[in-house]
Amino acid sequence: MTTKRTKWGALAAVGVLVIAFGWLIYGGLDSNVVYFLTPKELLAKGADGYDKPIRLGGQVKPGSVIWDEKALDLRFAVTDGTGEVVVHSKGAPPNMFKDGQGVVVEGRYGKDGVFKSTSLMVKHSNEYKAPTKGERPSEMYKSLMKSTGT
Amino acid sequence: MTRLLAYDAILVALAVTALGALFGPIAVRRGRRDWLMYLYAAVYTNFVLVTVSTLALVYGLVSHDFSISYVAQVGSRATPTFYTIISLWGALEGSIVFWAWVLAMYAAAVVWFNRKREGNLVPYAAMTLLVVALFFHVLLIGPANPFQPVFPVPFDGPGPNPLLQNHILMGVHPPLLYLGYVGLTVPFAFAVGAMLSGEVASDDWIRLTRRWTITAWGFLTAAIIAGMWWSYEVLGWGGYWAWDPVENASFIPWLTATAYLHSVMVQERRGMLKLWNLNLMVGTFVLTILGTFLTRSGIISSVHAFTQGTIGYYFLGFIALVLVATLFLVAGNSDKLASDGKLDAPLSRETVFLLQNLLFTTFMFTVLIGTLFPLVAEAARGVKVSVGTPFFNRMSIPLMVALLFLMGVGPALPWRKAAGPELKAKLVPGVILGLVLAIVAIVAGARNVYSILAFSFAGFALGVNVEEFVRGANARVKAHGESWPIALSHLVGGNRRRYGGYIAHIGVVLVAFGVTASSTFRTEQEATLKPGETVTVAGHTVRFKNAWGREEKQRQVIGATMELMDGNRVVSTAEPRMNYYPTSQQPVPTPDVRSMLSGDLYFNLMAFKQDGSNVTVKVIWEPLVPWIWFGGFVLCLGAVVGILPQRQKMAAAVPAVALAEAAP
């Protein structure tokens, strides 16, 4: 008798736990999933796109970069050809950051139309491509060596 | 020549494992114990053959034999020999070779140590290990073949991935991970052997696998900590855990293995949870294969890679095979898996173990679901998503805090039922330490409830676990008149598993302090500095001296010399660098870390003017981070203490155990 009752009790307890856990997971995923979007897709979302974790991918719009070295304040536009979104980030950009470069920025899109970035990554393919003039490591290295006189 | 030797060795090993796996059950069915030597010979032969193949591949790497596809893919003449050797596990195919070799080694060791044992457990376990080895041999001649001919033979290769040749820990972390990951195949093989031979009804197979499980768990623990350290020292973001799918893949089976190490004690002491333990062991193995699938098929980093390689299908097929086979086995043995005991009192050590298992399993599912969700979302809804760190933190931090609490309660509670006054005495030091640390955390500025609780419960657990040593040693001093250190060593020697466990708990506490402190009190400052300018982070003043360049054999280096100041005096210097490898457009950041007992100063060179007139550096104050690495060491020390042989001449307990084991 008692064993049967405890068995059902245990099953019910496990059931409640599983449901509670599932609900927690669902809620957690719902508010913390990061969407990969292009500027066009983000703009198409309208008000739905505000204040959600988003990973925005595209190119740095040539001529849009404003970099304040002392305040470590960076503004630029990310474009995918059709749409463009203004991005604001703090901190020095990665070394390869430049006009036309593919980038992925993670952050949230605000109601003011500015994408506040918490992380900025330069997109680079894993395949080997010969560096172009000016970005060849040996050149950067040589110019630094020359200036420091060592 | 080298290529053919390496390839043919795997081909023969494939035939040997297949024949052994088929032949083993025949020998057992016919009751021909004299035939078992052939089964065991297959296991040893496989080890010899895979060793030959692995050594041949390493020789190919070191001798720059670019006619071998794997060498052409990861080798380069400019790479230092150390990094050339360790590039054995730097890419997919080589890592499968290494996996097969570690598995062959474990299988040979398992058979060697248990070859004289009566019964059918060991033959079936050996057969299971051969089946798993067979799967990896199939991968090696199929989708992950590192021994393909290359023609025309290139003169030089691209070298290993720059990230993998930038730090010495790359020579440490992967072998540890394989020893842990692959080692978990051994308890799985024994579980299958126990079910096939019907020995699952007795707990003998559990005692037999105890050391193997702790060994594998210890290696996996060390590997995870070493991986965190690598990430911290190499990736330049100043963190050690990002809930990256690759990290999760190693962490998920660790959670179930840790749950098993605890719940198996309930089975040994009380004859409960037999079915549960069996499932944990099988589940842990499946999770290691799933983890390998996630990290090796390319499915996670690029979801579309599924169609490019076929190796993913092999893994999925193998996982399905293991699941179906073990499901049938468990169902067929369910009558032998009934509990002998039952829960006597709600406040007992058993209850804590049950709760602990519940939390660990929940933790496992949380990480698993978070890791797999992007795959499901893309398949079901066609959206590209990733699950961010906030999800994992939000779900796991309460679990971790609760587990810290249980780690303090568990050792204090006796088996079966709680005893009043003794329990109180055991809890007092822990409770005091917990309260003190809660106050210290609040005074230090912690405002997050979870981080205050984490400090407090970690202190509580520390107090209770240390108290176990103090109380036991004091009792021996009184009873035997031993000196305190002798009493302590006899205490630990008399019950190595128990005290090894407590040592591991203390290691967890140290890790918890490091993780909580560094996530609560981390401060960082990014600054663009001219030579001679300073920046102050958390009271530490740092001066930029100069930028410099250096040419090394396989790379070019640009660095900044930073001076750590005490007033006007230079205390020490740090040299964060950027390493430029010819094969990568991106420089590889190479942060520099100055460690103190109270924490690390972490320097990362972010950018520099090409004329050297200024640099941008990120300086991070990382409180208590060195404690994580030391705590990891203590954790592994606990595992080592747990597997060392028991001291022989112990009091009355030993004859009783010996009798019980001698009984049929």
Image (cartoon, coloured by chain):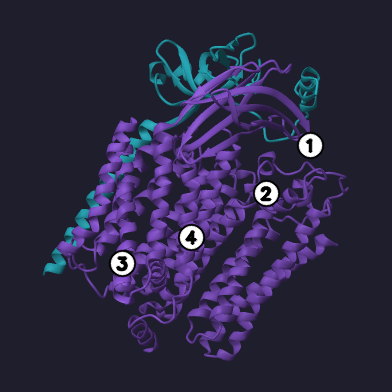
Chain colours: A cyan, B purple
Q: Is residue B17 above or below residue B630?
A: below
Same chain for labels 1 and 4? Say yes or no. yes
Q: Is residue B523 above or below residue B34?
A: above
On residue B637, the disc is 4
Disc 1 element: loop
- Point out residue B462 in the picture as x, y percentages from the top left corner: 34, 52
Distance of label 1 from label 3 (alpha carbons): 58 Å
Disc 4 element: helix
| Label 4 chain ID | B
The residue singled out by tag 2 in the image is: B90
Quarter placement of the C terminus of chain B: bottom left
Q: Say which of B343 and B127 sits in front.
A: B343
Q: Quadrant of residue B204?
A: bottom left
The residue singled out by tag 3 in the image is: B474
Distance of label 2 from label 1 (alpha carbons): 21 Å
Q: Earlier in the sequence, mark 1 or mark 3?
A: 3
Q: Earlier in the sequence, mark 2 or mark 1?
A: 2
- Whether residue B551 is visible to the viewer of this picture, yes or no, is yes
Q: Residues within 10 Å of mark 3 (few under 14, many from 20)?
A: some
Q: Earlier in the sequence, mark 1 or mark 4?
A: 1
- The answer to the question of whether label 3 and label 2 lie on touching residues, with beta carbons closer than 8 A, is no
Q: Earlier in the sequence, mark 4 or mark 2?
A: 2
Residue type at the position of mark 4:
Leu
| Label 3 chain ID | B
